[in-house]
Amino acid sequence: MSTARFLFQKLAQAVATKGLYFTKSLNYKTSPAPLPPNLDYVRYATLGLCYQEIVARKVPGNVAELGVYRGDFAKRLNQLFADRELYLFDTFSGFDRQDIVTEQSSGFSTGTQNFADTSAETVLQKMPHPQQCIVRKGFFPATAAGLDDTFCFVSLDADLYQPILEGLAFFYPRLAPGGYIFVHDFNNDEYKGAHQAVLEFCQAHHIGFIPLPDSGGTAVITK
């Protein structure tokens, strides 16, 4: 074994003790755009592959994210789906009290995490195509009232049981055949309500899903 390869393996082992891993990228397939420099390669790369399938299969519909926070994932959605409207659903002030009560009473999570350090203006400033963004600020699903759109891709990143369950109930019937829903935190032990919401909805409607080994434990649902 060469010295360089030996040193790389030692470095990889040391990094792995911190829960981080080196992996080869999809160097046999051209990415639709350079990936952002972050530590969530699996989630972003999977999004890129789903985007390519949506384009190749001419799947109709717009895009949405429920649980936008500061807009990092939404930025990637807006970059890829530049010709489609992107609905941004969020309170932009953190968890709603009624969802926290459900979370705590069911023992899913503490619900005390603070995601209030954001705003719709902060998010829109990050968007490469802000004219394509439609902000729906407030409590979901009330903020979806009157919306009867079709969607090719939806990101559910609301963390808590009730909004994720409501998100699945609203978006799955409106998901175009060949479209995808990403449910973040499905395998995140800090948000066990997300796991429960996916299981309940998928079992009730006989829907399959694929869990990803990304940093948040995303579940991918398709139609």
Image (cartoon, rainbow, N blue to C red):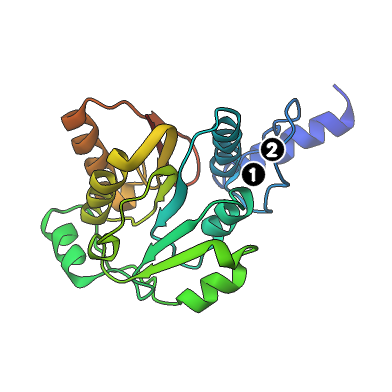
Residue 49 shows in the view: yes
Q: Number of labelled discs?
A: 2
Q: Quadrant of the C terminus?
A: top left
Quadrant in the rendering for residue 87: bottom left
Asked which secondary structure carries label 1, the reply is helix
Task: Please tell me the numbered disc located at residue 223.
Answer: none
Q: Residue at x 23, y 48 (%)?
A: 165
Task: Please tell me the numbered disc located at residue 12.
Answer: 2
Q: Quadrant of the N terminus?
A: top right
As drawn, the residue found furthest toward the left would be 105
Q: Nearer the viewer, residue 95 or 123?
A: 123
> Relative to 135, is 76 on the left or the right?
right
Residue 53 pos. (x, y %): 57, 30
Residue type, numbered disc 2: Ala
Q: Residue at x 48, y 38 (%)?
A: 60
> Relative to 205, is 72 on the left or the right?
right
Asked which secondary structure carries label 2, the reply is helix
Height in image: 48 above or below 121? Answer: above
Quadrant in the rendering for residue 162: bottom left
The residue to which callout 1 is attached is 15
Mark 2 surroundings within 10 Å by alpha-carbon count, few (fewer than 14), some (14 through 19), many (20 or more): some
**Distance between the alpha carbons at the discs numbered 2 and 1:** 5 Å
Residue 118 shows in the view: no
Residue 102 pos. (x, y %): 14, 59
Residue type, numbered disc 1: Val
Q: Is there a contact, CB below 8 Å, between mark 2 and mark 1?
A: yes
Q: Residue at x 65, y 37 (%)?
A: 13
> Relative to 57, is 153 on the left or the right?
left
Residue 94 pos. (x, y %): 34, 71
Q: Nearer the viewer, residue 51 or 151?
A: 151
Q: Nearer the viewer, residue 74 or 15?
A: 74
